[in-house]
Image (cartoon, rainbow, N blue to C red):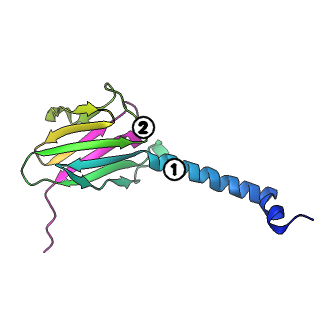
Amino acid sequence: MKSFITKNLYSKKNFQFYSFVFFFFLLLTKLSAQSFEVSVSGEKIQVFEQNDLPHALGLSTYKFARIPYRGESLSVKITTNGFDFQDNDWSISPKRYKIEGIKSGNQLSFDFDRLGYVVIRFKQNQDFTKRLVLLFEVPEVLP
């Protein structure tokens, strides 16, 4: 007679459940492995994830960071984790800002000196997980 643990662990129903949990865990680690670290003038900035895009359009989540701008030039450094990008893959928009970025390994650096936003594309395709939106805004003041 099989033990209770062996009998329940190897049943078809439990095997399917454990397989689902295992693959779900793999999927979560793969999705969370692709991330960005943002630092501005040496200060680490939190990166948020938004998922209000229509799934019917086949769009995924996008990531963004809110950066307080106090009127002085900011040195921005972005480090990618979980994927690599090539020299000719990345771009910074809007192009009218004429931002010159410097790529070094898995890092991209540039200076920014105004209120507004930029979109950094790390791959020239429709993969929204390889894009980062930076919002440069007036610091919040609590009354």
Q: Quadrant of residue 110?
A: top left
Q: Is residue 57 left or right of residue 41?
A: right
Q: Which residue ends up furthest to the left in the rendered image?
A: 71
Residue at x-position 62% and y-position 50%: 23
- At label 1, counting other C-alpha atoms closer than 10 Å, the crowd grade (few under 14, some 14-19, many 20 or more) is few
Q: Is residue 14 left or right of residue 53?
A: right
Label 1 residue SS: helix
Position of the C terminus by quadrant: bottom left
| Nearer to me, 28 or 124 | 28
Q: Quadrant of residue 90?
A: top left
Q: Quadrant of residue 97?
A: top left
| Nearer to me, 3 or 73 | 3
Q: Is residue 10 left or right of residue 82?
A: right
Position of the N terminus by quadrant: bottom right
Q: Which residue ends up furthest to the top in the rendered image?
A: 88
**Looking at the image, residue 38 lies above or below residue 142:** above
In percent of width and height, residue 6 lies at 82, 62
Q: Earlier in the sequence, mark 1 or mark 2?
A: 1
Say whether residue 64 is magenta.
Answer: no
Instruction: Give amino acid for label 1.
Output: Thr
Residue assigned mark 1: 29
Say whether residue 128 is magenta.
Answer: yes
**Looking at the image, residue 30 lies above or below residue 66:** above
Give the magenta-colored segment's residue range.
118-143
Instruction: Give amino acid for label 2.
Output: Phe
Gap between marks 1 and 2 measured at Cα: 13 Å
Q: Which residue ends up furthest to the right in the rendered image?
A: 1
**Looking at the image, residue 136 lies above or below residue 79:** below
Residue at x-position 55% and y-position 48%: 27
Q: Which mark is residue 83?
A: 2
Q: Which mark is residue 19?
A: none
